[in-house]
Structures are given as structure tokens and as C-alpha cells.
Amino acid sequence: IDPDDLEKKMISSGAKYLMVSHMRGKLASMDRIVELCEKHGVYLIEDAAHSLGVEWKGKHSGHHGKIAAISSQSYKMLNSGEGGFFLTNDPVVGAKAAVYAGAYEGLSVKHITVPGKEVFGDLPNL
């Protein structure tokens, strides 16, 4: 990604989200991309399936944005045939993902990696 062109497109499109897909172990200029996302209020999501173990200035791929998605489909570095991982440090986003994935009606308590019940607040079907 060309950061200068990215900034122009963020401004002209009114973008709210950016998904960066790290391919073949190559990462973009993540410090600049993070700076642009913060400056323009764009929510950064990383697809890190093809860059496990790769770092940008000492920080692993998938650790720059608000969310990291890692597919584990059969052709990925880490595979399970089908499936994947959703990673975030944001407890509200984690709670929403759990609800949208079907951990509602109190089923979230069966999972050790979801936020506590207090974070789920007004999310549907709790």
C-alpha cells in the first residue's frame, strides 16, 4: 500500500475501515498506516494469515490494528482444513464477535477467551 495514495483515498471516500492483507510474509509500512488510520478515524483490521511470525519494526503482524483475522483454511500457514481466528484487545469488539458467532443466551460463559458478562451490556440475546 502506498501510504500517500491511501491517505487521499481515505479523505475522498470517507472510509471508516481499512483491511490490510499481509501477503507472502510482506508487511506494508505499518507505522505510517496506523498513523493515517488514527488521524482519519479509520478502524484498522489486519488479515495476518500469510504473515505469521513476520514483524514490522519489532511488532508482529496482526498486532498493529484493532482486529486481526487469521484464516486457517487448508492452504494457509496454519491450517485446520476450515476455520480461523479472530483476535482483538478490545473487549467490546470481542463481545460483539462472540454474540454474532452464536455465543448468546449466556453461552459465552463456556468460553475462556471472551470478555466478562459485564462487557456484553445491551448486546442482543444475552
Image (tube, grey):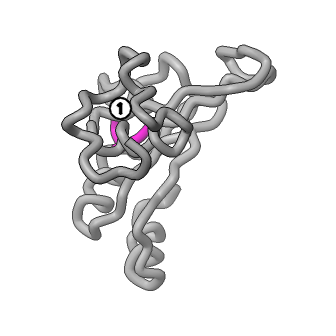
Q: Residue at x 42, y 17 (%)?
A: 110
Rendered view: 85 above or below 90? above
Rendered view: 65 above or below 48? below
Task: Decide whether the magenta segment is chiefly helix, strand or loop.
Answer: loop
Q: Residue at x 24, y 59 (%)?
A: 38
Q: Is residue 113 magenta?
A: no
For this view, does 23 lie left or right of residue 101?
Answer: right
Q: Is residue 66 magenta?
A: yes
Farthest bottom residue in view: 12
The residue segment tinted magenta is 63-67
Disc 1: CA contacts within 10 A as few (<14), some (14-19) or many (>=20): some
Q: Quadrant of the C terminus?
A: top left
Label 1 secondary element: loop
Q: Residue at x 67, y 17 (%)?
A: 77
Q: Looking at the image, which is closer to me, 18 or 95?
A: 95
Q: Residue at x 23, y 65 (%)?
A: 39
The x, y position of residue 26, in whole percent, is 56, 34
The residue type indicated by label 1 comes to: His
Q: Which residue is mark 1?
A: 63
The x, y position of residue 75, in whole percent, is 79, 23
Farthest left residue in view: 118
Query: In the rendered image, is residue 50 in sight?
Result: no
